[in-house]
Amino acid sequence: MKVILAPAVTLDGFLADANGECYTWINPADEARYNKRRSEIGCELVGRKTYEQYKDSYDMQSNVTIYVYTSKTSYADTPRVKFISGDIHTALSHIKNDGFTTVLVSGGGELNGVLASAGVINEIFLSYHPLTLGKGIPLFGSYNPQLSLELLSTNQDVPGVVQHHYRVVR
């Protein structure tokens, strides 16, 4: 299974402020670019905290299956939102068994860290937004993975946002 991480980050490497808020600073054109990629892939993997914060937005998705990675068992699947748990390899196998060959990951930081530490991320589309927060949720949460990356391309089609596309080198 191909795992693509596609976060928006500040120049100081944060996905969101300390409260998990990011939609006040993400460029709408970058968000549209992300949504287009998500629609093309057909599924998205998010962490439980990210899902809970933006639940209404995820629940409104009609053309994408959302997988929520969580250790909590109190959730019930819906036709478009599936809750998965276990080690990350088992969770990804569940997505693959549903017929998907690629999954787009939108975070949060802890999920990104789990995926990076497990060595399952294949590509990263990293969108740098022109601001700093000083503190917040780091790209890989509390994890400190070491990744070797090959820069495949740089895109500046969204004003003020630089997006680097990397391949993870194994």
Image: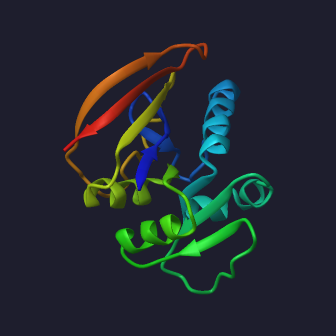
Residue name at image x 58 percent, y 58 percent: 50
**Residue 109 makes an appearance in the image:** yes
Q: How many marks?
A: 0
Note whether 80 is above or below 64 in the view shown.
below
- Who's the residue at 69% across and 31% down the image? 32
Quadrant of residue 143 in the image?
A: bottom left
Nearer to the camera, 41 or 163: 41
Q: Is residue 48 visible?
A: no
From the top left corner, tell me how far across and down residue 76 is, in percent: 69, 82
| Above or below for 42 versus 124 | below
Residue 6, horizontal then vertical, whole percent: 49, 40
Q: Is residue 85 above or below residue 45?
A: below
Q: Is residue 31 above or below residue 109?
A: above
Q: Which corner quadrant holds the N terminus?
A: bottom left
In the rendered view, how is the structure colored? rainbow
Please indicate whether residue 58 sits to the left or right of residue 41 in the image.
right
Residue 115 x/y as whole percent: 35, 57
Quadrant location of the C terminus?
top left
Q: Which quadrant holds residue 150?
A: top left
- On screen, residue 74 versus residue 93, left or right, reads right
Which residue lies at the image location 67% right of the left edge and 43% below the top edge? 39
Q: Residue at x 51, y 25 (%)?
A: 131
Where is residue 160? Give x, y as percent. Answer: 56, 15
In the picture, measured across the screen, residue 116 lies left or right of residue 44, that is left
